[in-house]
Amino acid sequence: MSVQRLKRVLVGRPIPTSLDQHERLSRVTGLAVFASDALSSVAYATEAILLVLVAAGALAFRASLPIALAIAGLVAIVVTSFRQSILAYPKGGGAYVVTRENLGRYPSLVAGAALLIDYVLTVAVSIAAGIDAITSAIPPLWPYRVTLCVAGVLAIAVVNLRGVREAGRLFAAPTYVFVAAYLAMIGWGFTQWLRGEVPPPPAGPLTSAPRADELTLLLALRAFASGCAALTGIEAVSDGVPAFRPPEAQNARQVLAALGLILIVLFVGITSLVYAFGIVPAAGETTNSQLARRVFGETPLYFLVQGVTAVILVLAANTSFADFPRVASFLARDGFVPRQFANRGDRLAYSNGIVILTILSVGLLVAFQGDTHALIPLYAVGVFLSFTLKQSSMVRYWLRRRGMGWPSGVAVQGVGATVTGIVMVVIAATKFAHGAWIVVVLIPTLVVAFIVVRRHYDQVARQLSVDGARPEPPLTAHTVLVLVGDVHRGVLRALRYARALSPDARGVYVEITAEQTHRVEERWGRFADGMPLVVLRSPYRSVAGPLLEYLDQLQRQSADHLVTIILPEFIPARWWQHLLHNQTALLIKGALLFRKGVIVTNVPYHLEE
Amino acid sequence: MSVQRLKRVLVGRPIPTSLDQHERLSRVTGLAVFASDALSSVAYATEAILLVLVAAGALAFRASLPIALAIAGLVAIVVTSFRQSILAYPKGGGAYVVTRENLGRYPSLVAGAALLIDYVLTVAVSIAAGIDAITSAIPPLWPYRVTLCVAGVLAIAVVNLRGVREAGRLFAAPTYVFVAAYLAMIGWGFTQWLRGEVPPPPAGPLTSAPRADELTLLLALRAFASGCAALTGIEAVSDGVPAFRPPEAQNARQVLAALGLILIVLFVGITSLVYAFGIVPAAGETTNSQLARRVFGETPLYFLVQGVTAVILVLAANTSFADFPRVASFLARDGFVPRQFANRGDRLAYSNGIVILTILSVGLLVAFQGDTHALIPLYAVGVFLSFTLKQSSMVRYWLRRRGMGWPSGVAVQGVGATVTGIVMVVIAATKFAHGAWIVVVLIPTLVVAFIVVRRHYDQVARQLSVDGARPEPPLTAHTVLVLVGDVHRGVLRALRYARALSPDARGVYVEITAEQTHRVEERWGRFADGMPLVVLRSPYRSVAGPLLEYLDQLQRQSADHLVTIILPEFIPARWWQHLLHNQTALLIKGALLFRKGVIVTNVPYHLEE
């Protein structure tokens, strides 16, 4: 029972269902929980753009400003359409639910697959970038970054298994400190720039003569595609409407507007300053870290920026820990993923979803060795695919209902769907060879898996349905076999039980050596009170083989002959003592699992010490 | 069932017990199987000596000749005493069995622990040295040596799981090719040396000016201790007497004598030649490889020597795969390790011992990164400890029996015990800090574990004993509870069974929502044919909690009230479909495992697709 105790310490005591309502989030904590993913992407989006542009030389960095503005416009379009969709789905509707209701099953499965993949990637990218922020400030930690990544994911998993309210509280403070610190950095940086105080770039290999090649359209599009990582996480608010306190829809819309505004200010501000300060991506230090170091010098403020960046990024993964299990539970309720994902654990969290998300994202971090910019090409395809599906669904929604304000609904969502659809194609095409192909292959694979799972559940339901069934007639023949390896007190207990079940009870013994058989037969005669003992020969030392043959023989006698096989077992007082005993019972159960007309029962005898 | 099929392909079809006799070894194959460990140690023992002497400079290499001769004398002493002990134990007696019979339980447990540890080390050291031989000849493979080590262990494990005769056949040829190739190398090398044709040592850093410090006694003892690795594996023949064809004892004695002779010739020959050729240990190439290269040049003969060295070393590990499971099975029959180690698998091999040995030796190889000379300090302590215990036991044996020739028996074994005891202390003392301490700590730890396991088995036997027991009286009260989550065809099947078991049968349903309860009650009314349904409330969404409370309530009514809980379950047609269903049944079984007076039974309903 020590595993139970460990779970209590880590996860806390069970919470009754009746307390569900009180786990809701206020606007202030809601912004903290759902904003961290979207806001934290400013930690790597600017660098992602520059890492593409650097191929065309430092002069090409000029292009980062119009690219950042285009992405800001994209943010505005997406936020507008999502705020409108909250109005239509006040009970909360992520891409999966909205697509299912408006476009039907198959598009919704594509959306579901895209969402699940992206939540896993959110965890991996956010954690990797968070550890980047730490190792930028403390270079000696660099060799340990994969270990640090894994530790970060596990820590968040434990917090989430404790339940959603405590998670919200824990995350509120850092989100606001992050916003304040970044606004301070941007403000002070611009002040320095306006005063003409921007210091010259530091000497050294970092800035030495980048090539001044021509900037091609393809390169610009790839840079834009990389920067679109800034939009990831925006969907979290509209997926999570039911987590807000009432009035849920109104609170969620306000939070989403605030989130969009802050995101645009931070992202455009940082990209502009990085350009103004002439910062170039470097190995071992993020561009944001370089910027903070230049604005604040090596003061405590610099370390505050890096620290809070790390914290918000590590916590950003938390958005996915709220959303992955939720989407998985929607899919589970519809029968497309295993039912277990619809169960809430004893702390009201969807524990199975949390555990799977942890395993997948740790696997990804280890496989990619915690390299943020190697993960980013996989990232945005699924996000924009789900945006497009959701916005297309909303177009359909407004066209069907034609309620108040439907023309503006169609216009907002139509523009959104068109723009995000084009962006998705741009990302998939320009990033295909860099990793986007993985996601392009994975999404249809997952959709097929969903369909296979659903078909299985449908078949099970059909076969188990009691429509047209009648109560079964009483059993005609029931034989009880007590399988014995020796005659001990546990066997005596089992014999008593066997006698209570059926008048046709027999012992069965599989012979190892003739000598042992004599001993067993002698004791059986003394203790079995007249019950017959069947001795079976076993040339291959297997117990299952002769037993199966004997069952064939028994059941050939009548069509409806049920056999109960009783396995006497003793239960040791301590768990480790189980390892010291043969698991023959388990093997026999396995061998008989697919056999009809046979029921296997363990009759336990509890040892005291 | 696909795991079953994979096992068949790798391991082969089951072998009946009646074929046991035919698995015996002739002298020729017996030498091959049991000699590989002892002979293969000439591949690393000479280098182990030189690696210690090198600290005192190249002049100290002179000392390698007297050290080799001392070790040859040690081989003669040990072989003589072991041949004599086969005479006394014609049914085979390793250190464990012989010590148990003559010195009693605790010394025999020390011997058993020492043997198990050394078999694991034999696998690790032999495989590591075998891969050294390969990478000496093919340097580009060096970076992959840990992977190669693991692959080698796994290959041998599979061969052994197939059974002992096939293993013998496979290993006979390489052992004889090895002996022939080494004799040819030694013969040709001495011819070159006698003719004065020995070429000067090659130029380069390998031979550049070693220091000419003074050779201390401690250093000489440490070099001797390292060289004693040459004796490892000699005990295999006397442990494995029953594996020989009749007359077992006579065949085993002849094989042991041949083995000792070949070992002395090869070891002294190689050590002399390495000294004569002025070879110095070097990183990346073994001294044996350097010797073979100098004697044969880079001809096919050189590659033959390296190849067959690698093969015999990789196969040497096979000795342990015969012996570790055998000693473990002796300990298991005496109740000191889990009983499962006494079971033979369906190919007549002790499968569990083979599996555990594989896991431990792979772990050791990975932990020590396949470094032969880092593993050697751990190696010989246990070997010599078991030699000493066995020889001391034989002294006791002859003193007790006083049969024909007892004085010479006492003399041979007494000299052996004294010499090997001193050597053991020398090894433990001079190699303590280099790793021998691990074994010094591990042996008593294992002995304590053996005693704890045995005490548990004794307690179980006492509690299960039918001495003084009587047949149990018939059951007075038996309630059958059918646990339902919904009413489906599987439940109808379970209801029929419940009715057959006891007139007091009831349904139990744990309420999730009131709405679902109504649905279940309605269907229950239609199909349960009047059986009562008990509805339990569950504030924490747990099924086990309310069920346990209800059981308390039921069983409080009478002292001897047995309850059978029936879990209706459906068995999907394919194994992967199990993953798609809740494992509630398993959780409930776990929760009730330690509860007395309760028997849990699954009633299966088999699905067709």
Image: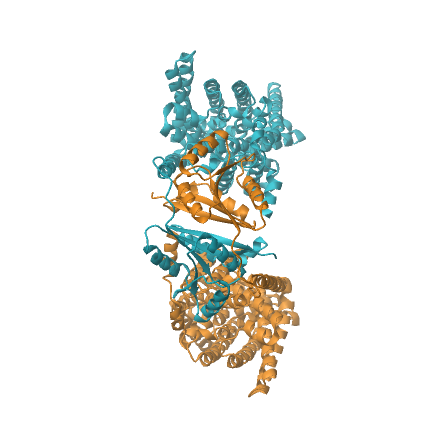
Chain colours: A cyan, B orange
Which of the 4 image quadrants contains residue A444? Answer: top left
Look at the image and tell me in which quarter the C terminus of chain B lies.
top left
- Of B127 and A354, nearer the camera is A354
- Of B78 and B338, nearer the camera is B338
* Residue B193 place in picture, x, y as percent: 47, 76
- Of B551 and B347, nearer the camera is B551
- Of B499 and A232, nearer the camera is B499
Q: Is residue A216 visible?
A: no
In screen coordinates, is B351 left or right of B404?
left
In screen coordinates, is A486 left or right of A293?
left
Q: Is residue B18 visible?
A: yes
Which of the 4 image quadrants contains residue B414? Answer: bottom right
Query: Is residue A528 positioned above or below B389 on the image?
Result: above
* Residue A583 place in picture, x, y as percent: 48, 57
The image shows a total of numbered marks equal to 0
Residue located farthest toward the bottom when viewing the structure as drawn:
B404
* Residue A285 place in picture, x, y as percent: 56, 35
* Residue A502 place in picture, x, y as percent: 43, 53
Query: Is residue A601 positioned above or below B191 on the image?
Result: above
Residue located farthest toward the right when viewing the structure as drawn:
A300
